[in-house]
Image: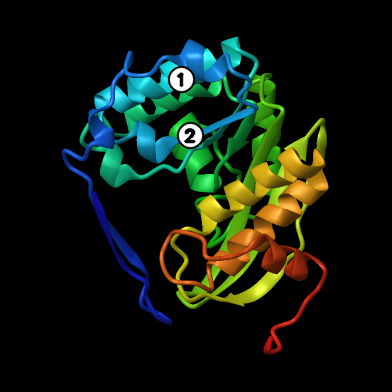
Amino acid sequence: ATVYSDRGQGVRAPVVFYNRCNEAAGQLKPGDFNWKEIFGNGVRWFHSGGIFAALSASTADLTVEAVKAAKKHGTIVSYDLNYRPSLWKTIGGLKKAQEVNREIAKYVDVMIGNEEDFTASLGFQVKGQEKLGHIETDAFKAMIETAVQEFKNFKVAATTLRHVITATKNDWSAILWHDGKFHESRKYPELEILDRVGGGDSFASGLVFGFLEHNDAQKAVNYGAAHGALASTTPGDTSMVTRKEVEKQLAGGGARVVR
């Protein structure tokens, strides 16, 4: 698999092209893993997402099998909706995406996604979405509340909030719903972007870390937002950021040179 990315600059929008036809992961199918052996040994957390589910019809089925098995063994399940229309179009498009993701959602404890993910993948609507260049926090909160009413198994629902000013300057923050309350991260206004690809994944991993390490919703959303912000300042979609750097950012650390 290869992914080609133009990071964009100023008024030129970023463009990402997925070349994932016939990749090894896309050929995985139900029955390929011994879930009883995997989850029966005390796995604490299982994470997957919509990109893997969209690689092929068989990976969609495999993801459903995996989340069912994880829940059966008491493993926490998190899922990043990560809706990518260019991937889903080869296996049934939007209709298939909603069919698969709504089935997966029945077994998810921690659901992650932005406004497009929730609307496209699960069929929820954000009031005023069609008029706004970005989603107002209150409108998105209302949509999250609708989602957790339908999927009562959601213990956490979280999203990044990104207002694209230019390709190289975004307002960035995150919100998280847990136990009937919303927690908002520190805001990063006019965050200077080197490469936005991977920011959402870094948010998700920071959030998971926050829960595993501290079991605290506010810390989780703060870790996620800080990690995502820092990852947007490095090239590529794999984080180059250390825990020390994230915690420095959380403590209010500046951008002065470190020698």
76 displayed left or right of 25: right
Q: Is residue 173 visible?
A: no
Give the distance between the C-alpha atoms of the residues marked 2 and 1, in whole angstroms.
Answer: 9 Å
User: Label 2 amino acid?
Assistant: Ser
**Element type at mark 2:** strand
Residue in view at x 58 percent, y 65 percent: 241
Rendering coords of residue 59 (x, y %): 32, 27
Q: Secondary structure at mark 1?
A: helix
Most distant residue in the left direction: 22
How packed is label 1: few (under 14 Cα within 10 Å), some, or many (20 or more)?
many
Task: Provide the residue designation for mark 2.
Answer: 48
Vertical position of residue 195 compared to residue 75: above or below: below
Residue 62 coordinates in the image, percent (x, y)? 36, 21
Q: Amino acid at mark 1?
A: Ala
Give 189 or 207, whichever is nearer the viewer: 207
Mark 2–mark 1 CB contact (< 8 Å) = yes
Image position of 135 with respect to 74: above or below:
below
Residue at image coords 46%, 20%: 66
Q: Residues within 10 Å of mark 2 (few under 14, many from 20)?
A: some
**Residue drawn 65% across the image and 51% down it:** 206
In this view of the protein, can residue 46 be seen by the observer?
A: yes
Q: Which residue is mark 1?
A: 66
98 to 137, vertically: above or below: above
Please indicate whether residue 102 sits to the left or right of residue 5 in the image. right
112 relative to 210 in the view: left or right: left
Q: Earlier in the sequence, mark 2 or mark 1?
A: 2
